[in-house]
Image (cartoon, rainbow, N blue to C red):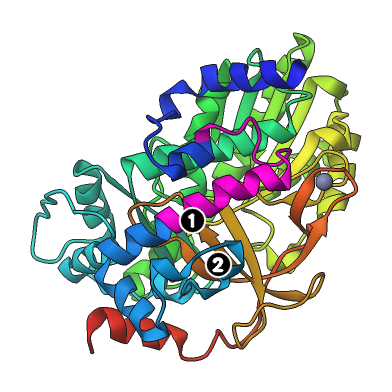
Amino acid sequence: MLRYSFIDRFNERAKKYVMPIETPVDKAIYKPTSFFSIPDKEADVYKFKAIKYAFRHHYENNAFYRKLCREKNVTPDDIKSIDDFVKIPLIPHEFFKEYPSGREFAVWLANIMSIELPKVVIKGKNPTYDEVIDAFKEAGIIVAYSSGTTGRFTFIPRDEKSYKMAEYSIAKSAIDMLQHWWDYDTYAYLLFPDPRTTNIYVGKVTAVLFDLVKDARVAIETKITTDLLRISMGNIRNFKEKMMSKFIRSAMKKMNEKMVNKIIKWAEERDKNNDRIFFAGAPFILSMVMDKMEEEGISFDFGERGAVLTGGGWKTQEDSRVPVEEFRKRVEKFFGIPSENCLDLYGMVEGNGYMVHCPQSHMLHIPKTYFHPFVLDEEGDPVGEGEEGRFAFLDAIPRSYPGFIITGDKVKLKNSCECGREGYVLEPEISRIKGEEIRGCAEEMRRIMMGG
Ligand SMILES: [Zn+2]
């Protein structure tokens, strides 16, 4: 009965993220004891109802999405089984990057949304992105973002319920794969910006960690704004920003050194006290820590007392990508943490499905009860089993925007894993698709939405 007790223990700790069960989507999130280990047959019942319900919701409540459906000649009544999911119109990810500035940005956000927008009060004639985001937050809408290497952002608005469900799902997915290890009596280090002072999605959604372990601290304490992020990505607009970027770079360098030293000192204390430790976050931060440990000849042997969950970091570090397997070997060497306890999570700001390594084979398992994956060729047609292509998905969680999205990520999808869990998995090496985005789709979406 170990498995049963795990989900009870988890739900107890995550109870502030548990919403009343009212819709087929709520059922698909909160009823299953696992998103990964559930048999296909059982999962498909949840998934079909949840995604069909979500499709109807966006079709009925989102003018631009309905227009897209009409152009493609699809209505919710056409979705009679999972085989029909392929008919549900998908939105290219570029669409969420085509935002205007100032007050127009607020209008743009409102137009994306499939729910009645609460009253948003925006001060000033020409507000910054952060000011608009703060105004939405006042009204109960969390606008999270991430940024690509071009400094262009992806903005996604979530209502409170969708956001809580996203947090619940990331935690349930991660802890499920670590259930052989997870214990509340653990010290954690979050290798991300502080969720309480950032709207960067990876920082934001991981706030749930504070509820799953008895003690958690945060590596990056500085408040990071859209401007700071843009400038530090090298997207510089004027002389003042050029000076700022120099300053930011040298400040960042000093901050990084301080951060690395703090983490090593923390690990020394935890080691001395025989504590359990958990690193969660960007792999490049832990790589920096291990570089320093190597330099100074430091290593620990946490063994079964330690675990690592990486996320969000492999593709932004394209030039110096640490292969995932190599990374696990280093974690074992410097922290003594076995590879079964060193897992990666793959997700993105546009979606609320979190793919997590299984401890046995380190394949990325796809949550089965509310999230449906596709791999598409550049014409937008599904590719065959095991072939490479563009990742796309139907995500039932978000009420506030249609979560039916084509991403810019290149993946390989398989429908089995050696670990024995049924269902789809992605191979762990995920990269960006080079060159052209799917032609015309983004422009088509812009026209539909802006009417231009
Ligand atoms: Zn597996």
Residue 132: give x, y in percent of width and height. 22, 56
Can residue 371 be seen here? The reply is: yes
Q: Mark 2 or mark 1: which comes first in sequence?
A: 1
Residue 314 located left or right of residue 296: left
Hey, what amino acid is under mark 1? Ile
Contact, CB < 8 Å: mark 2 with mark 1?
yes
Residue 287: give x, y in percent of width and height. 75, 46
| Camera-nearest residue between 271 and 388 | 388
Dominant secondary-structure state across the stretch colored magenta: helix
Q: Residue at x 44, y 28 (%)?
A: 18
Classify residue 38 by image quadrant. Answer: top right
Residue 189: give x, y in percent of width and height. 62, 30
SS of the residue under disc 1: helix
| Camera-nearest residue between 171 and 293 | 171
| Camera-nearest residue between 55 and 174 | 55
Cα–Cα span, label 2 and label 1? 8 Å
Q: Is residue 250 magenta?
A: no
Q: Is residue 47 magenta?
A: yes
Q: Residue at x 53, y 19 (%)?
A: 13
Give the crowd class for mark 1: few <14, some 14-19, many >=20 residues within 10 Å: many
Disc assigned to residue 51: 1
Q: Residue at x 67, y 22 (%)?
A: 266
SS of the residue under disc 2: helix
The image quadrant where one finds the C terminus is bottom left
Q: Is residue 59 above or below residue 424?
A: below
Q: Is mark 1 within 8 Å of ligand 1?
A: no
Disc assigned to residue 85: 2
Q: Which residues are magenta?
A: 30-53
